[in-house]
Amino acid sequence: QSFFDKAEIKDLVAWLRLIANSDDDPAFIRAVTTPRRGVGSTTLEALGRLAGVRHASLFAAAFDAAAESYVNPKQLDAVLEFGQLINKLEWRAQRELARQVLEDMLHAIGYEAWLFDSFDPREAESKWANVRDFVDWLSRKGEEESKTLLELTQAVALISMLDKSEEGGDQVQLATLHAAKGLEFKHVFLVGVEEGILPHRESIEAGTVEEERRLMYVGITRAERSLSISYCERRKMGKEWRECEPSRFIAELGDDLKRSVGKAAEPTDRASGAARLAQMRALLAGTK
């Protein structure tokens, strides 16, 4: 197991990624649930519904005025407290060297205490030693190169991603358009590029499609070698099937696209769908 694949290092990297980019939804999910602060899959699903309506990140949705209509007040308070901590750390990460910010972050989130509450003493000690090694390494790197924590975080994200790619094996990275900013991939698949999704229905109604167009541009420019764009001919909404229309952004790309028509997948039975949803919920709950 590589160093960056250890759960405790993944936890800290998630916090750092979120500090560097608050629109990073996978990092948000891991950080807000580790250490646990009373925010579980139900809260994340509710927040995700609002994020979908607003076509925004989970972090942005937490501070939306409508959040109190979606999320239980007690859980929303916990999420907002978490968000305020991220904002404070982000402000400091741009201005200060790494060591003090990292030490204060670990103290603020109570990570050491959480480890010893969650694991047997020997395992907790081993995990905490890994955390200390990571903090010392990152702090020394910051001191030697005179870099802020924010600058170091970008390097850490790249190193951990390269570390994964060297492990080999076929794998797919899922990301929102917001979270993909600043990253590049050899092959990119944009799915659900339909009117009402991208651009989002509310943006169409409000006449604010330009921001959606910029998001589409972000997605397109993540690709180094190939870009695949897909949309559905129809979707099931509740008990009804509804026809779908390709996004206007596809037409704006011109005639250089290679178009193909895929065969629709066979409908999934209820049991298989429930099992797949349970797996997704387990991931959202921060299962390691």
Image: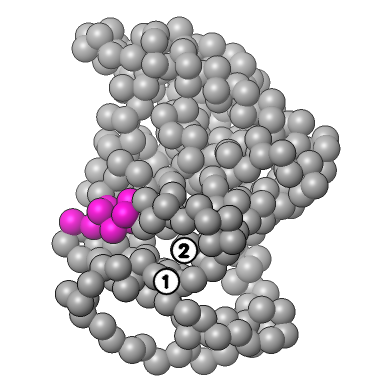
Label 1, label 2: how far apart the Cα atoms are: 6 Å
The picture places residue 258, in percent across and down from the top left corner, at: 21, 80
Q: Residue at x 49, y 35 (%)?
A: 22
The picture places residue 196, in percent across and down from the top left corner, at: 54, 68
Residue on which disc 1 sits: 247
Name the disc covering residue 110, or none: none
The picture places residue 51, in percent across and down from the top left corner, at: 61, 50
Number of callouts: 2
Residue 117, magenta (yes or no): no
Taking the image as drawn, is residue 106 in sight?
A: no
Q: Residue at x 45, y 7 (%)?
A: 100
Image position of 199 (left or right of 240): left
Image position of 46 (left or right of 259): right
- Label 1 Cα crowd, 10 Å radius (few <14 / some 14-19 / many 20+): some
The picture places residue 263, in percent across and down from the top left corner, at: 40, 92
Which quarter of the rendering shows the N terminus? Answer: top left
**Stretch in magenta:** 217-224
Element type at marker 1? loop
Q: Residue at x 60, y 21 (%)?
A: 85
Q: Nearer the viewer, residue 120 or 224?
A: 224
Name the disc covering residue 198, or none: 2
First along the sequence among labels 1 and 2: 2
Taking the image as drawn, is residue 80 in sight?
A: yes
Q: Nearer the viewer, residue 231 or 119?
A: 231
Disc 2 residue type (three-letter): Leu
Q: Nearer the viewer, residue 275 or 8?
A: 275
**Quadrant assignment, res 59:** top right
